Image: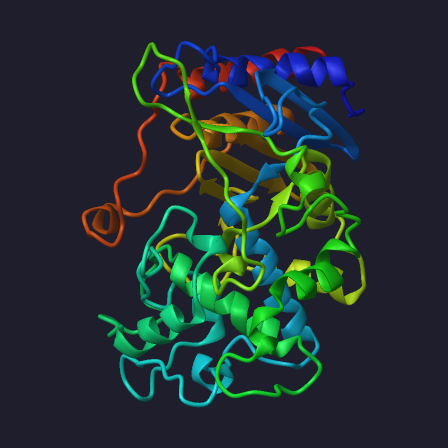
């Protein structure tokens, strides 16, 4: 099968993303002002825009040049740093977290012989809560190491690690700090959370962003980056104009950087997804392969950072009105990255439908079991927030695509 051209791919995915769009001045529940979509298919890369995606400093930019906040998609980058550290024999997946904490900082185990290990942080199975303590609007970029110490000192796990899946920003915030530490080649020069724990942006750039050629991916929102940053919006009242959401500065030494502080572009995210398909034989390639390996059953199938299902790897992110989702099927060599400048739409479902249409087989995405859904640790799956019947539309798109071959 030859790779479809830009026009054919665009015609295929447009019916899946256009129904998500509402005008900027007429807000509608379950819809957003604008969506950017990147597609990787058989080695070809395509970028598309639907609706309006204005920039922070006015005007607009090509989809390829617009900077977007990818929020919790950052977690897969942190998980990849863990995989690199494992391959370099700096740590093991089963290394207890306590061994990597600074002197005087302790973590409570469920039982003494059942410590929280690095693999638990990377698979949301440490038993940590979802949110960071204390919560705030832009918690990823403004979370203190003192707050991390207090959390670890005060939190008492309710069940053994590795037994249940519970999405945890807190767990990945800690993992990010630990990965900064283990990849820091110079010994710490001070007590407590030394500078080695605060170097995630530099470690990620050296080990991931530069080798992947992701020149427009960063933590700091410098003036040149902010000039290309998409505005984000919230829904105050249906029928009124979408409300702007402000984006403040990000402290590059926040204790939660590795959980969700990256900004990027569609081409950069496609470069990241391309390496999920063609790993390569180097350490980075082998680390990427390790992140994709399924870990022990946890209710939801997990790699390291990735959720795994139906031959696909996926991750999403929400932050200050920004929504993003990436999904890749390595065997079919297809990937989709989607971004919306407001929360509340079924962007994830549309991206899964687009990938299913491109590979010619609908994505059967896993959900928590009924027993887990009834547990407060496992919230009810989000309903579709717009009237589009994605399953029906996806099948129609697949049929139309196959007829062109």
User: Residue 321, relative to residue 127: is it above or below?
Assistant: above
The answer to whether residue 405 of the structure is visible from this angle is no
The image quarter in which residue 236 lies: top left
Q: Quarter of the image containing the N terminus?
A: top right
Q: Provide residue 269's location: percent of width, then percent of height.
A: 67, 41
The answer to whether residue 68 of the structure is visible from this angle is yes
The image quarter in which residue 198 lies: bottom right
Q: Provide residue 34's location: percent of width, then percent of height.
A: 54, 20
Q: Provide residue 138's location: percent of width, then percent of height.
A: 43, 48
The image quarter in which residue 242 lies: top left
Question: Looking at the image, which residue is at 62% across and 41% down?
Answer: 329
User: Residue 62, relative to residue 187: is it above or below?
Assistant: above
- Which is nearer the eye, 242 or 298? 242
- Which is nearer the eye, 19 or 244? 244
Q: Provide residue 118's location: percent of width, then percent of height.
A: 49, 73
Question: Looking at the image, which residue is at 46% across and 63% down?
Answer: 173
């Amino acid at each position: 099968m030859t790779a479809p051209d830009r026009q054919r791919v665009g015609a295929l995915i447009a019916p899946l993303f256009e129904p998500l769009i509402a005008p900027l001045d007429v807000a509608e529940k379950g819809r957003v002002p604008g969506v950017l979509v990147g597609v990787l298919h058989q080695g070809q890369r395509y970028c598309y825009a639907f609706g309006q995606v204005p920039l922070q400093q006015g005007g607009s930019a090509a989809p390829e040049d617009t900077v977007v906040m990818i929020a919790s998609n950052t977690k897969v980058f942190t998980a990849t740093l863990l995989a690199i550290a494992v391959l370099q024999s700096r740590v093991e997946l089963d290394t207890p977290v306590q061994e990597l904490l600074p002197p005087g900082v302790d973590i409570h185990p469920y039982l003494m012989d059942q410590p929280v290990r690095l693999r638990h942080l990377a698979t949301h199975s440490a038993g940590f809560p979802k949110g960071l303590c204390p919560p705030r609007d832009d918690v990823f970029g403004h979370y203190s190491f003192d707050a991390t110490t207090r959390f670890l000192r005060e939190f008492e796990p309710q069940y053994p690690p590795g037994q249940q899946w519970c999405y945890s920003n807190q767990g990945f915030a800690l993992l990010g700090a630990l990965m900064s530490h283990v990849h820091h080649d110079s010994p710490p020069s001070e007590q407590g959370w030394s500078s080695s724990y605060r170097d995630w942006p530099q470690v990620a750039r050296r080990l991931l962003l530069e080798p992947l050629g992701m020149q427009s991916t960063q933590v700091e929102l410098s003036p040149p980056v902010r000039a290309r940053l998409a505005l984000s919006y919230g829904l105050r009242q249906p029928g009124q104009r979408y409300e702007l959401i402000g984006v403040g500065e990000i402290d590059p030494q926040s204790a939660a950087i590795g959980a969700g502080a990256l900004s990027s572009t569609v081409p950069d995210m496609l470069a990241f997804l391309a390496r999920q398909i063609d790993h390569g034989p180097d350490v980075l390639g082998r680390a990427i392969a390790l992140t994709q390996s399924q870990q022990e059953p946890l209710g939801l199938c997990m790699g390291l950072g990735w959720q795994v299902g139906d031959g696909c790897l996926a991750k999403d992110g929400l932050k200050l009105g920004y929504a993003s989702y990436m999904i890749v099927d390595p065997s079919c060599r297809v990937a989709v990255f989607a971004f919306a400048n407001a929360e509340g739409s079924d962007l994830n479902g549309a991206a899964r439908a687009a990938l299913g249409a491109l590979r010619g087989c609908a994505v059967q995405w896993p959900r928590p079991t009924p027993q887990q859904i009834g547990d407060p640790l496992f919230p009810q799956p989000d309903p579709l927030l717009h009237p589009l019947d994605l399953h029906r539309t996806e099948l129609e798109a697949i049929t139309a695509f196959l007829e062109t071959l």
